[in-house]
Image: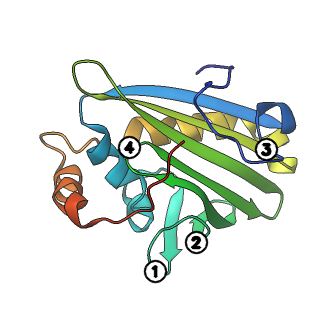
Amino acid sequence: MSAEPHPGVHWPPGWGPDRCDSFVSHERRMAAPSGAVFAHLVAVEAWPKWQRGVERTDVAGDLVVGSGFVVVTRPHVLDGIVGELVWPSRFGWAAISDGLSFYQTWLLLDEPGGGTLTIVQEASRGPSALVRATARAELIRSWVDALPSGGAGDEHGQAAARRDAGLRFPRTTP
C-alpha cells in the first residue's frame, strides 16, 4: 500500500487525498492485458462474484459517465455514479451511503513487455471512513488482489475477454 497519490490519477473537484478523512492506495501487477482486466473491472453486475463484501449490485443500462448503480455491502447500501470511464485504462466512481461517501479510482497502465499495472485509490469521508479506516484499506486491498485477470485458468476472465469486442464505452483523452 502506498500512502502517496499516483500522479496519473484524476480526482474530480472536491475529492482527493488532501480532501478526505481516509485515503487508500494499492497496486498489483498482472500478466493480463489491460483490456481483459478492464472488462472485469467495469462489469459491475459481476462484482459479487469476486469483490469481498459485495452482496449484490443493481445496474440499469449501459455503464457510461454519469450513470448510476447500487452496490449492497455489509454494512452499507451504496448509491454509485460513474465519474470517469476511459477504455481500457480509467474507471472512477463516487458513492454515498449512510455514514460513508467516497471516490474510488482505478488506473490501468500497460507494462513494458506486456501485462498491466493496476492501481486503485480511494478517498473517503464520514464516520465509517474514520472509524473503519484499517478495515476499509484491507477491503480495497482484497478487491485489487481478487480482480480477475482474464488469464489462463480464469474462466470469468476468459469470458470477459471474449465479450471485449462487444463492449462500448465513451472514449475520451485524459
Q: Is residue 102 left or right of residue 170?
A: right
Residue under pointer 3? 15
Q: Is residue 148 visible?
A: no
* C-beta proximity under 8 Å, tags 1 and 2: yes
Question: Where residue 9 sits: x, y (%)?
Answer: 60, 34
- Residue type, numbered disc 3: Trp
Q: In the rendering, at what x and y percent does residue 79 appear?
A: 68, 69
Which numbered disc, 3 or 4, marks the residue that appears first in the sequence?
Answer: 3
Q: Nearest to the eye among marks 4 and 1: give it.
A: 1
Say which of 96 and 172 sits in front. 172
Q: Name the one closer to the observer, 133 or 102.
A: 102
Residue flagged by tag 1: what amino acid is it? Gly
Q: As drawn, which residue projects farthest toward the front? A: 173
CA–CA distance in space, label 3 to label 4 = 24 Å
In which quadrant will I find the C terminus? top right
Q: Which mark is residue 61?
A: 1
User: How far separated are the C-alphas under marks 1 and 3?
Assistant: 27 Å
Tell me the colour scheme of the image.
rainbow
Res. 147 mark: 4
